[in-house]
Amino acid sequence: MFKTFDPSRSNFPRDMRDSTSDGEFGDLPEWNLDDLYPSTDGTEITQDMDWLSKECPAFATDYEGKLADLDATGLLNCILRFEKIQNIMGRVMSFAGLRYYQNTVDADRAKFMADMQGAITDMSTPMVFFSLELNRVDDAKLDAMVAADEGLARYKPILDQMRAMKPYQLSDELEKFLHDQSVVGATAWNRLFDETMAGLTFNVDGEEMVLEATLNLLSDADRTKREAGAKALVAVFQDSISLFARITNTLAKEKEVEDRWRGLPTPQASRHLANHVEPEVVEALRNAVVAAYPKLSHRYYALKAKWMGLETLEMWDRNAPLPDEDNAAISWDDARATVLGAYSDFDPEMARIAEPFFDKGWIDAGVKPGKAPGAFAHPTVTNVHPYVMLNYLGKQRDVMTLAHELGHGVHQVLAADQGELLSSTPLTLAETASVFGEMLTFRKLLDAAPDQAARKRMLAGKVEDMINTVVRQIAFYDFECKLHAARATGELTPDQINAIWMSVQAESLGPVFNFMDGYETFWAYIPHFIHSPFYVYAYAFGDGLVNALYAVYAEGDPDFQAKYFDMLKAGGSKHHKELLAPFGLDASDPKFWDKGLSLISSMIDELEAMEG
């Protein structure tokens, strides 16, 4: 519950969309982090760290061993003090984390990030008692206080989330130990992974390239370049696979040990609890997607092979553009106009909220040496604003990524009024605004398609994105489920991990693919497996949810915009059942997921019909 800079909470995109930047896209914006702190050693951050160093032990002195004796007013005041501490910690760690992800190979930035993380961990140790002791308060007494005090009742969702972990709570001493050792445990292994990935270079026909640029070759129009990029990735991943296997083995074992001590029933249980989603809902989603592989990915990729004049596809053909695709670079100004236009068509207020991201240094768009790969939107703290990171390459996918991350940003701005403890949305719902923003942008572009060929390209691109969001992420989820189950029986060799990866790839992508030697190592670069185990199903959850939501919007619900903004403003204060009820939707209904999958299938139907 204490603040760190966790990139999984910053919404890394589905496939680490790729990038190297030059001036052809116009002037790409960079972050201005002054709204957090103007410097690493200035008065502002020094004062905040001094305040934390005094307030954290003072909080413990005032409340440790006393929570059970507080009345409703006293408990509310305690929570408000806790929330303020969380806000200042979050501000510090957001500043340190965002600076670090701008250049992960800069030693000074890495040191500052590590020093702040260590200091915040030490300061927060005396406060570990808070959730543990609160969970020992008699349920009936706590319920009565919440019912009697309107201010305290506002925090009921937080209290309920804490109590969901009550059965898995360890002793105070063990909880403090786990808290303290995290800096040299998972956090350290995460940092090793990030810095190793950022430092890798790939030799492509004599040119040394970073990861993003090399991954970008996999969607190049020239098949020889795609193959060269794939082989360069394989060469480096194979050389480094023992290290990535070591990181994966260690983190999986660490998780297994902690889960066992807590008595959690499955490796996935902690993720489901954090997401406030029932295991059976996730299982229904997973089963619906796996059952749909033949009518989605298998069918689409067979169609793509036909378009490309190939009997089989190599793995480097998966993200290839269509043969007649327009590869002209899209300028940053055009990308901005497209996304803000789509947002404004839905509701001018949505565009108004998004506009400052472009004008006030809230976006870092260019590709730079050492910069973290992919894209994310980080909410920082509720009295500042979110920041968006991109690696912009001027492709239509990059425009969609901009729409995606700005959707997160709009969501985070709207939820900020909930305050520090209630604004954070569970991962299953955190993708709602981002995927909806993508859908709005896609529909605007599709409606403006000048001819059937352009419409076909756009539909194919959207289908590929949805397959990456749904099929690929559920395959990732299955990979993690199998990997953690296998790791529970002993250390896994790189070959064993590779075999698990290939089992889910073959099943999800279908028989049209031929997998090159070395592709079995491609699990190694996926950051979600390292930073946040079992995160990935949230993308499929969000896509299915948005497809159902968009159907309600398309049907002409006159109050849709108001309901939608209310849902985003709720942040983490409501359960998914409560949030979806105004739209007549229920994610616990197994048939709910079929609606979203049917939308993808209908797009493939249209593409097939174009062949006739």
Image (tube, rainbow, N blue to C red):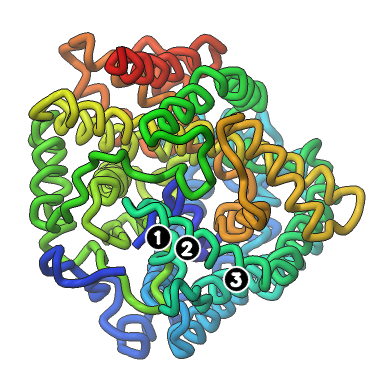
N-term mark: 2 or 3: 2
Image coordinates of residue 396 in percent, x first then y, are: 24, 46
> How many marks do you count on the picture?
3
Regarding residue 214, the answer to whether it shows in the image is: yes
N-term mark: 1 or 3: 1
Give the residue displayed 42% in from the left and 40% down from the top.
Answer: 430
Disc 3 residue type (three-letter): Val
The Cα–Cα distance between marks 1 and 3, rounded to whole angstroms, is: 17 Å
In the shown orientation, is residue 143 left or right of residue 149?
A: right
Give the quarter of the figure containing the N terminus.
bottom right
Answer above or below: position of 485 versus 394.
Answer: above
Q: At numbered mark 1, what does the secondary structure look like: helix, strand or loop?
A: helix
Residue linked to disc 3: 236
Q: Nearer the viewer, residue 161 or 553?
A: 553
Regarding residue 80, the answer to whether it shows in the image is: no
Residues at marks 2 and 1 touching, judged by CB atoms closer than 8 Å: yes
In the shown orientation, is residue 511 left or right of residue 95?
A: right
Give the residue displayed 9% in from the left and 51% down from the top.
Answer: 334
Residue linked to disc 1: 225
Image coordinates of residue 275 in percent, x first then y, are: 56, 38
Q: Nearer the viewer, residue 603 or 63?
A: 603
Residues at marks 1 and 3 touching, judged by CB atoms closer than 8 Å: no
Residue linked to disc 2: 228
Disc 1 residue type (three-letter): Lys
Give the quarter of the figure containing the C terminus.
top left
Q: Nearer the viewer, mark 1 or mark 3?
A: 1
Dot 1, crowdedness within 10 Å: few (<14), some or many (≥20)?
Answer: some
Image coordinates of residue 49 in percent, x first then y, are: 44, 80
- Which of the 4 image quarters holds residue 196? bottom right
Q: At numbered mark 2, what does the secondary structure look like: helix, strand or loop?
A: helix
